[in-house]
Structure formats: structure tokens, C-alpha cells
Amino acid sequence: EDAMAGSNMLTTTGIAMVVIGILAALAPLASGLVFDVLFGALLVAAGIVELFDAVQSARWQRGVLVALGGIVTLALGVLHVMRPMVGLVVLTVVFIAYLVFAGAFRMVLAFELPPGVPGKFWTFLSGAVALLLAFLAVGQMPATSLWLIGTYIGATMFTGGIARISLGRGAREAADQMGS
């Protein structure tokens, strides 16, 4: 029962991720801007928390340092919210570095999985897609900002969803074999 519920949850969340991934990939600029604004909102919230923490500090030296960090965090958050295209360019540069590391990590992880594990191929493919996007992105800077983050979100959601569906099927098959 628990194994079936778990496999159904993996399959359901996988299908949802595939649909979201397709939508994000079809509108990469829009999904990138939405991501950037949400990121900015989180930075604004974090900056406010840091400023509140600075006011509550028992030592003024610590309070000043925390307040400076809070001001920088708040300013970056406001930049991302108020000027999402500028924020998207900044995020793109950082994101290219992330793609290289995440892609390499996923590909290595795929080789570390035992042979025959469902989703192994899709884990590898997810890493390869990340590295391919990083390579393409560097060659097209600064226009890359118009498509990179949204395309990556879409591709990652799609391949991650397929991996979840595969893992759900594998768990269901294992549960069926254990039950018989």
C-alpha cells in the first residue's frame, strides 16, 4: 500500500513537472522574468529580516555589520523586483556557472547509480542538457539573458518530471514483484 502510494505520488508530481516544464520552455523570457521577480522578493524579505536583526543586536558593531548586509540584500532584491531585465542579466551570469557545476554533478551521479536503476538515463540527460545550455549561453551573451533561465527551468522540470515518472514506474514494478 505505502509503496503504491509513493509510486503514485512520484508519477503524479512527475506529470505536473513535465507540464510546467513544457510551459516554461515555450515562454522562456516570461518564466525567467517570473523567476527573477520571485528571487527579488525573497531578497527583499531577507534584507528586511537582516535589518530587523541588526536593530535587535546587543552589540552595536554586530548591528552595523548585519545592517550593512541587510541593506545590500534589500537593494539587490529591489533591483530584481523593479528592474527584472537587469536582474535577469545578473542572474544569467551566475546561472551559467551554476549550469556547469550542476550539469557535471548530475552526469557523475548518473554513473554512480547502479546499472538498471530507473531514471538513470534521464539523470544523465538532465546533466548533459545543463552543460549544453551553459556552452550555448556563453557564446550568445548578453542576449542569453532572454532565454537561458526560462529554458533551463523548462528543460529541468521536463527531464526531472520524466525521471520521477520512471522512478514511480520502477517502484510500482518492485512493489508488484514483492507482493507476488
Image (spheres, rainbow, N blue to C red):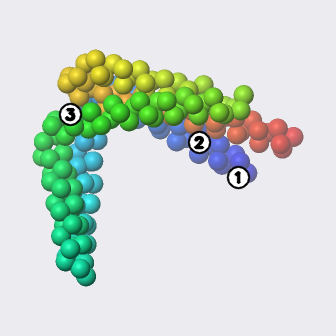
- Residue 70, quarter of the rendered image: bottom left
Within 10 Å of the Cα at label 2, are there few (<14), some (14-19), or many (20+) other Cα atoms?
many
Instruction: Estimate the spatial distance between the alpha carbons at disc 3 and disc 2, rounded to whole Å.
Output: 34 Å
For mark 1, give the secondary structure. Answer: helix
| Residue drawn at x 82%, y 38% as measured from the top left | 177
Q: Position of residue 170 (x, y in %)?
A: 69, 35
Question: Is residue 31 shown to the viewer in this render?
Answer: no
Cβ atoms at labels 1 and 3 below 8 Å apart: no
Looking at the rendered image, the disc whose residue lies closer to the viewer, 1 or 3, is: 3
| Residue drawn at x 45%, y 35% as measured from the top left | 102
What's the mark number on residue 10? 2
Within 10 Å of the Cα at label 1, are there few (<14), some (14-19), or many (20+) other Cα atoms?
few
Q: Please name the residue that numbered disc 3 is placed on.
A: 89
* The one of 172 and 77 positioned closer to us in this rendering: 77
Q: Position of residue 121 (x, y in %)?
A: 60, 25
| Residue drawn at x 27%, y 48% as measured from the top left | 39
Amino acid marked by disc 2: Leu
Residue farthest along the left direction in this orientation: 82
**Sequence-wise first label, 1 or 3:** 1
Q: Please name the residue that numbered disc 1 is placed on.
A: 2
**Sequence-wise first label, 3 or 2:** 2
Instruction: Estimate the spatial distance between the alpha carbons at disc 1 and disc 2, rounded to whole Å.
Output: 12 Å
For mark 2, give the secondary structure. Answer: helix
